[in-house]
Structures are given as C-alpha cells and as structure tokens.
C-alpha cells in the first residue's frame, strides 16, 4: 500500500489518511458495539430461559407426580407465546420423554436422554437442561432450545446503521479534510515549487513563504537558510572559477613567453659551441668539454621545446604539415642518428625487424620523428647497461566489411595498419603507474632523487601527436624490472608515384657539390644573428 501511495500528491495522501483514520475509528466502535451486544444478548437470553424453565418446571410437578402427560403438554403449549423457543421437552425421572413441544416435531429431533444440568450455545441456538424439583426431590428434567435469530436481526440493523454512519462520516471527513489539509499541504507545495524553480533556473534568490512557527514553518525557515548558503557558495564558486580561468590564461601566456625567451638565448650558444667543435685547433680536453656543453644545451632546448609543445596542445594550436612519408626511412634515420650512439655508450644491443610491406603514412614527418625520438630516448635511458632494445615494424590488415580505412588528402587509403613496436629490457612499469604514464609531468616513479631527470612531457606530447594523426600509442609492461613495450599504430596510404615510380626521399639538407650557397638570415636577436 505504501508503494502505491509513493507517487500520490500530498493533498490526496492527507485526505486518504483522514478518511482511513475516521473509517477505522468507526469500524472499531461498531465492532465493539457488536461484541458487547452479542455478549449481553446471550447472557440475557440464558437468564430468561432459566427463569422460563423454572416456571415450567414448577407448573409441571403435579403432572409428573400423577403421570398426567396431557397436562404436561398443555403446560408446554404455553411456550407458543415465546418466539425465541424453538423446542421444549419434559423428561421423567427415568430420563424418558414425558411431553414435548411443538407436538408436530418428531421425537427423534429431541435428545434421547437429558444431558447435564446447565446451558450451552450450539451453532445458532441455546440448549438448556434444568431439573424439576419437588421439595428437593427430582421428579424430572426440562429441556429448552432457544433460537438466536433475534440477535442476528439486531446485528443486521447495526450493520446497516454502521454503513450509513460510515458513508456520512466519510463525506463529512472529505469535506473537512479538503479545507483543513490546506494548512499542511499548501506550505509544502510552495516549498516544492521553490525547489523546482531553483533546480530549473539555478536561481538561489527565491524564498519560501513561512506560514507559522510549527514544524512546517521551521522546515521553511531552514530551507530558506539553506538556499541563502547555497547562493553564497555558488557565487563564491563562480568567482573562483573565473579567477582560475584568468590563474590559467595568465599562466599559459607566461609559459609561452617564458619558453620562447628561454629558447632564444640557447640558439647562439649552441651555434657557437658547434663552431668551436669544428675547429681542429681545439685541444681534445677542451673538445670533450665543448661536447658536454653542447649536449646539455640540446637537452635544455628539448625541455623548452616540450614546454612549448604542451602549451600548443593545451590551446589546440599544434599544427601538422602532413604529406605522404615513409615511416621506415624516418625510423632508420632516428635509430642511426639518435639511438645508436646512446645505446653504444651503455653497451645496449639494438635490433630491428621490419616485415611491413606497406610503410607509407599521411603524416607530419618532423612530428613523427619527434615521437620516435621520445620513445627511443626513453628506451635507452631506462634500459640498464648490457640490456636490449628490439624494434619491430609490421602490418595488420583490416577487414573491409568491419573497418573502413581513413581517407587521405594526398594518396589513396590502404586497408592495412602500420605498427611500430619498441620493446626494451629496462626497469619496467608497475600496474599502478601504467595508466598515468601518458599524463603530462608524469614520470612513473615519483621519487625525490629524480635519477633520470626530465619533465615527464615526452609521452604526453607523443600521445597528442598520434591522436592528431588519427593513430594511437599504447604501453604495456609485465611489471617492475621486466621491461616495457610501446606500440604505435597508424593508418597506411599508398605511396605517391612519379612517372610510375615511387617518389624518391627528400635529400638531407647540406651543401650541394659544385655549387655555392648564399644564405639570408633574418633574426631580431643580435647574438643569434
């Protein structure tokens, strides 16, 4: 029942409560009247029948003494005036029926022998046995059977009266409840409307009307106070969010300017070190120092470039200059120029397995090179001496019916994916850290000693670059000291052909034999110029 009333309006709930309460009170009162009437009626009937049995017994002593059955029947015939008596009989001292009433009732309808003295109620009738005495001598027994029909007639009358009173009281209760329940439901409904207005319009300035000092009034007052507190908190939160949006805009601007300003003075320093390294008159000792200076300048420049890249990614300004490029040549170039030397210093074995037949993708070659450089640098950095780095390049062909290849702008799309896997035997990644390694400024192991250095931006930038290319980068590791595997996935395209031949790779920048070069340098930084 409570489940059915869950969605009923509060007005109807209150009205139903009043009706049920009044109906239950009437039912309880009517039941009490019926029970009381039943008890009193049965007691009164038993008393009346006992008195009647005594009178009949006193009048029939002579008939029993002189064996006058006719006189006994005449005495019992007087019971016609008693509507409640259904049957009566006089038994002699031997327990045989001496006379009966009514005379047309068969003898077998009477008890064969009298039972113990007293009365009892059986079904819808009263059965009584009383002794017939003459000077303390028992001459016989009188039997009376009384009907309880009058009592049930009264019950029917009481039921009709109770029904009539119940209908009238219900109508009256509905009328009264319709007027009285407003004092309870109206304030609650007003609070509900205020809550709806707050929810829909987010207007915390509305307030509920207080109609009294009872519990509903206290609820209204507490509700209004809550709205005031929420309004204050909302205003403070909005102001804080605006301040934060501006603690972010200024930070991004500052980071962009700072990164640029930090990058600018490194350019002439790096150029000067490079010129000094090319000077053959420099002693080997100084040459080693210059190499150390150059290496640290390049690391510093890379960190600043990462900061600039992450700033561009945050603002959605990382532009791609895409064309059809051969991933194989890019990867081989990276391994020869960046990975071979670093791996040789730590005696790390590097192996390459290229089984892919389709290696062309529509990508920004410089950004793709940056991703390869980040992964190879991490593999060399986190792999201990005498470890191993394995690079695999292979294709995965997709089903035509299930996966559609991505369209390209400069070449037809292919039904194959290019996967580049870089696996190392380094320190590995534990299960807790693995989901976070592509987050910005995340370096996996958070320790104070910072053994490996860096800002933890390389993987975050690499993931952003791959997503901009419509590809993906994933990491896997079996745990600490069990190495790690990074996989790059890109959609392949058909190579661009010129006169039926594949377009040759762009030659590296440098001096063309037999030709002189004139270079125009435009630079607003004097040292760089």
Image (cartoon, rainbow, N blue to C red):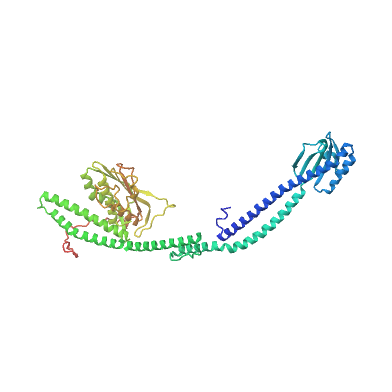
Residue 123, by quadrant, is top right
Question: Quick check: 107 above or below 24?
Answer: above
Residue situated furthest top in the rendering: 94
Of residues 254 and 226, the one drawn nearer to the viewer in this rendering:
226
Looking at the image, which residue is at 38% across and 58% down?
A: 407
In the rendering, at what x and y percent does residue 10 appear? 55, 59
Question: Quick check: 294 above or below 526?
Answer: above
Location of the C terminus by quadrant is bottom left
Q: Position of 20 compared to 69: left or right?
A: left
Q: Position of 60 compared to 469: left or right?
A: right
Q: Position of 346 compared to 321: left or right?
A: left
In the rendering, at what x and y percent does residue 390 appear? 29, 44
Whether residue 361 is visible = no
Question: Quick check: 370 above or below 137?
Answer: below
Whether residue 399 is visible = yes
In the rendering, at what x and y percent does residue 350 appear? 26, 44
Of residues 245 and 123, the one drawn nearer to the viewer in this rendering:
123
């Amino acid at each position: 029942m409570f489940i059915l009333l869950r969605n009923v309006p509060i007005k109807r709930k209150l009205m139903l409560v009043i009706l049920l309460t009044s109906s239950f009170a009437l039912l309880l009162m009517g039941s009490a009247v019926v029970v009381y009437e039943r008890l009193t009626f049965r007691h009164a009937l038993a008393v009346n029948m006992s008195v009647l049995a005594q009178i009949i017994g006193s009048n029939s002593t002579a008939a029993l003494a002189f064996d006058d059955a006719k006189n006994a029947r005449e005495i019992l015939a007087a019971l016609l005036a008693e509507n409640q008596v259904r049957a009566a009989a006089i038994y002699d001292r031997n327990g045989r029926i001496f006379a009966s009433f009514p005379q047309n009732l068969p003898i077998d309808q009477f008890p064969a022998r009298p039972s113990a003295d007293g009365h009892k109620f059986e079904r819808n009738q009263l059965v009584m046995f009383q002794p017939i005495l003459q000077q303390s001598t028992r001459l016989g027994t009188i039997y009376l059977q009384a009907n309880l029909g009058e009592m049930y007639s009264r019950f029917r009358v009481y039921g009709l009266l109770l029904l009539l009173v119940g209908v009238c009281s219900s109508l009256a209760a509905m009328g009264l409840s319709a007027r009285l329940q407003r004092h309870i439901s109206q304030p609650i409904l007003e609070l509900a409307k205020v809550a709806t207005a707050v929810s829909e319009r987010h207007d915390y300035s509305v307030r509920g009307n207080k109609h009294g000092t009872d519990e509903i009034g206290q609820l209204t007052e507490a509700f209004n106070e809550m709205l005031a507190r929420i309004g204050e908190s909302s205003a403070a939160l909005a102001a804080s969010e605006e301040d934060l949006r501006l603690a972010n805009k200024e930070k991004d601007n500052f980071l962009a300017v700072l990164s640029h300003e930090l990058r600018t003075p490194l350019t002439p320093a790096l150029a000067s070190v490079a010129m000094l390294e090319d000077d053959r008159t420099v002693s080997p000792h100084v040459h080693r120092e210059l190499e150390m200076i150059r290496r640290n300048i390049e690391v510093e420049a890379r960190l600043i470039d990462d900061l600039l890249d992450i700033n561009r990614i945050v603002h959605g300004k990382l532009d791609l200059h895409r064309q059809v490029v051969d991933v194989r040549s890019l990867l081989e170039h990276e391994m020869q120029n960046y990975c071979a030397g670093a791996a040789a210093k730590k005696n790390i074995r590097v192996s390459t397995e290229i089984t892919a037949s389709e290696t062309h993708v529509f990508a920004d070659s410089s950004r793709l090179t940056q991703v390869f450089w980040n992964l190879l640098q991490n593999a060399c950095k986190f792999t201990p001496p005498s470890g191993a780095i394995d690079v695999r390049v292979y294709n995965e062909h997709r089903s035509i019916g299930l996966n559609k290849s991505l369209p390209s702008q400069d070449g037809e799309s292919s039904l194959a994916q290019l996967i580049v896997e870089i696996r190392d035997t380094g320190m590995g990644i534990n299960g807790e850290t693995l989901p976070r390694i592509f987050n910005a400024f995340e370096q996996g192991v958070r320790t104070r000693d910072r053994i490996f250095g860096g800002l933890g931006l390389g993987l975050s930038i690499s993931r952003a670059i791959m997503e901009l290319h419509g590809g993906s980068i994933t990491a896997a590791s079996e745990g600490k000291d069990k190495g790690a595997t990074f996989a790059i996935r890109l959609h392949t395209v058909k190579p661009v052909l010129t006169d039926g031949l594949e377009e040759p790779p762009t030659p590296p920048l440098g001096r063309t034999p037999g030709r002189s070069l004139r270079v125009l340098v435009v630079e607003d930084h004097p040292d760089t110029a």
